[in-house]
Image (spheres, helix red, strand yellow):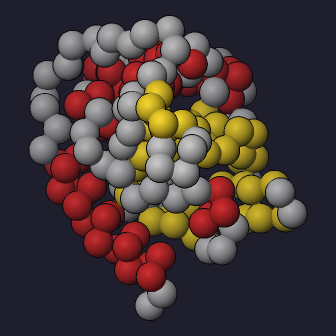
Amino acid sequence: MNRFAFAFAVLTASALAACGGAPATTPATPEASETPSTEPAADGTSKSTSDIVDTAVAAGSFNTLVAAVKAAGLVDTLKGPGPFTVFAPSDEAFAKLPKGAVDDLLKPENKEKLKAVLTYHVVSGKVTAADAKGVKSAKTVQGGELAIGADGDTVTVNGAKVVKADIECSNGVIHVIDTVVMPK
């Protein structure tokens, strides 16, 4: 088992345990500044001090995703220490779903289904685009597998194209995808 696969196995087990303990009540609305805060890293680049949720809120292009994370009760989990890799569908990606699909998922009676869809977009550990190019699949927090493809600089996840990669967060990384991927 290579180093990457071993880390995935260990971190997936940790994340699944963390997700199982998510609160049953809807957490308070996360507050975020307009711009994620950063601090200088040792290599001279900047590293975000904002977590995944605050970074998504500040970006302004993940309104549907953020609403879904709130409805599913996953805010506290994704604000946790992680690290997590989130393949985040943009608002445009959610708009591609059949009419009424998002509204249906956001209904309280569909909370478990929504949670399954969202956690299917999350992988335990920090997986950069360079890391993703070296693997064929990744186990999600939901328990399913995402097929990872790479062709030159293009990375795909279950056929969804990564349109922006490696958005650094204090507790992981976000990769923006152009399509919502659904668990089987």
Residue 100 horizontal side relative to residue 5, left or right? right
Residue 173 horizontal side relative to residue 177, left or right? left
- Between 16 and 98, the one nearer to me in the picture: 16
Q: How many marks?
A: 0
**Residue at the image point whose x is 47% and y is 76% from the top:** 4
Q: Residue furthest right?
A: 152
Quadrant assignment for the N terminus = bottom left
- Between 133 and 24, the one nearer to me in the picture: 133
Residue 158 is situated, as x and y percent measured from the top left of the image, at 66, 56
**Residue at the image point whose x is 58% and y is 13% from the top:** 60
Q: Is residue 20 placed above or below 104 in the rendered structure?
A: below
Q: In which quarter of the image is residue 61?
A: top right
**Residue at the image point whose x is 52% and y is 14% from the top:** 35
Residue 164 is situated, as x and y percent measured from the top left of the image, at 71, 39
Q: Is residue 15 placed above or below 168 in the rendered structure?
A: below
- Between 105 and 8, the one nearer to me in the picture: 8
Residue 120 horizontal side relative to residue 31, left or right? right
| Residue 44 showing in the rendered view | yes
**Residue at the image point whose x is 32% and y is 21% from the top:** 71
Q: Is residue 87 placed above or below 1 in the rendered structure?
A: above
Q: Is residue 168 placed above or below 183 in the rendered structure?
A: above
Residue 153 is situated, as x and y percent measured from the top left of the image, at 83, 57
| Residue 177 showing in the rendered view | no
Residue 165 is situated, as x and y percent measured from the top left of the image, at 66, 44
Q: In which quarter of the image is residue 10?
A: bottom left
Q: In which quarter of the image is residue 141?
A: bottom left
